[in-house]
Amino acid sequence: MESNGRAPAWAAALIGLVAGAVAVGVSLPVAALVKPSAFPVVAVGDAAVDLAPAWLKEWAIRAFGESDKTVLLAGVLVVLAAGAAVTGALAVRRLRYGLACLAAFGAVGLLAVLTRPGAGPGDAVPTLLGAAAGMSALSRLLRRALVPAPPRPDSLAPPRPAARPAVHGAGGPRPETGAGPDTVERHGTPGPAVMRAGEDLRSFDRRGLLTAALGGVAVAGIGGAAGRLLSGGAEVDAARVGVALPRPAVPARRVPAGSDLKISGLSPFFTPNRDFYRVDTALLVPKVDPRDWTLTITGMVDRPVELTFADLMGRPLAEADVTLCCVSNEVGGPYIGNARWLGVRLADVLREAGVQAGADMLLSTSTDGWTCGTPADVVLDGRQALLAVAMNGETLPVDHGFPARLVVPGLYGYVSATKWVTEIKVTRFDRDEAYWTPRGWSAKGPIKTQSRIDLPKPGASLPPGRTVVAGVAWAQHTGVDAVEVRVDGGPWRRARLAEAPTADTWRQWVLDDWDATAGEHTIEVRATDAAGRTQTAERAPVAPDGATGLHAVTVTVA
Ligand SMILES: Nc1nc2c(c(=O)[nH]1)N[C@H]1C(S)=C(S)[C@@H](COP(=O)(O)O)O[C@H]1N2
Ligand SMILES: [Mo]
């Protein structure tokens, strides 16, 4: 292809962006048919999550909280868009350069797709088809935007426009040459003003580019819409809504009156599902059809087990109130919630499979390849470790692991709470490693005793006088025995503890007779658990095994 520098920068960028959109728009529905994780845009984002160093991930969680994934996907799209614009700029120089650029993007996508856990050669198809479509779009757009130049002024015979110039031969089947809006306005004057005699063989056709770009956008849009339809998300949502939850064979312990102090601004005893924190590495939430779902128990067992969703629902189900908490939760942070879970007791299933001597780890895997290592003795010690199918009386929300997830009281989520779980391998800590372990987190993660002030809010301005200080404290499976509060480093005062049904949930606490005086005050809280351990004031970061320190809130009284 001959060189040409005549297309303006915006046109070059548009050519690249439309070609890129076609590539993405074609790969999406193909991925929806092949495997959602074979969609290269998401695969690249997922690979970035897995490859990112621990400090970067911690920073992202701190800076963006639960929107960290949206931010990452937006970042991938921004990089893609910039790359597409560059591709366009190169392509107007030489098509070959643009094609090479697209091929490079395709190669990165291919690498990401093929290195995802559980990827097969078939996963390459969406990326390959997308890249091919993008390349074809790129050359078409270019052909429409840069057309063989109209005849020179001296050869122009009135009236214009002349019949198709005979010079069109190779690759330039555009009859509208020279009929772009600006040429029409100029009546009879020679082609676009950019023409300089003898310098180039082609000129920029704005209308040609814009119609071709519209075509490309339509292809990309139809692809995107088809991708959404084909992804099966709607089917899974329908299947989820259709699940009839059985009554629990073992109901939860009665929640004592007074477990919820019902103070406005204080975390309710049960966290509504819509407010429940979400932490996982999945860029696109796995949509698992319960009719296709199975759970296998493999590894060091006497009898490997395979359970379908119907098998699960047909077994006696137990209910348990458990407070789930993330190891990434800073002191005073939001990544904690309490729910009523319904599910099969994990210990029962494991006993049926027959755990062999020497096994000390349950390595669970989710559909998206995330893995989690749970100490086997903890699950088997009689606590309510569940393979849960429901949360707060509702079928498990998709975000929280539908159709089934693990919940183990007393362990941080990263070592216990596998969502979309499909396999539990009985193994040993000295033989297997879970997702977060090589990334700077401890292999075992018992929850540390902690407390949080919910009221007053940090930075609040309050009137002087009697002020309510309230919050939650937790020491799952051990229990909270006492909570104390102090103001401005003064003496610790006992807060009143609300009831809790078991040691597996948090407890609300309140101190309702703080006499606030004018000025700035710092309120601190500490909990003591039933094992007699009082929270340390010493600050530790979240990595490798959970933050320590006292939550402090500073307020202004005036
Ligand atoms: N499949 C999968 N399950 C997962 C995770 C994950 O990244 N992938 N993250 C875990 C972590 S770190 C936590 S804290 C809990 C959070 O559960 P939630 O999102 O339902 O609150 O899920 C756990 N289960
Ligand atoms: Mo977590």
Image (cartoon, rainbow, N blue to C red):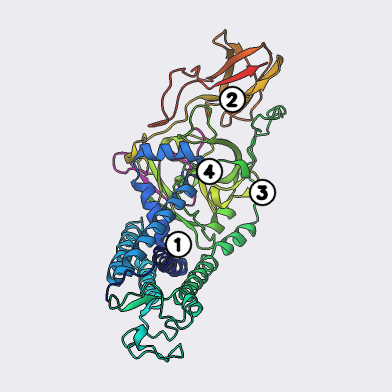
- Mark 4 or mark 3, which is nearer the start of the sequence? 3
Question: On the picture, is 258 further left or further right than 454?
Answer: right
- Assess mark 4: CB under 8 A from ligand 1? yes
Tag 1 residue: 36
What mark, if any, has residue 372 been given in the picture? none
Indicate the position of residue 418 as horizontal and vertical percent values. Answer: 47, 46
What stretch of residues is rendered in magenta?
A: 408-435
Q: How many angstroms separate mark 3 from mark 4 (CA)?
A: 27 Å
Residue type (three-letter) at the residue carrying disc 1: Pro
Tag 4 residue: 278
User: Looking at the magenta stretch, what is its main secondary structure?
Assistant: loop
Residue type (three-letter) at the residue carrying disc 2: Pro
Q: Nearer the viewer, residue 95 or 368?
A: 95
Q: How many angstroms separate mark 2 from mark 3 (CA)?
A: 42 Å
- 362 is higher (above) or lower (below) than 158: above
Tag 2 residue: 458
Indicate the position of residue 511 as horizontal and vertical percent values. Answer: 66, 17
Q: Within 10 Å of the Cα at label 4, are there few (<14), some (14-19), or many (20+) other Cα atoms?
A: some
- Mark 3 or mark 2, which is nearer the start of the sequence? 3
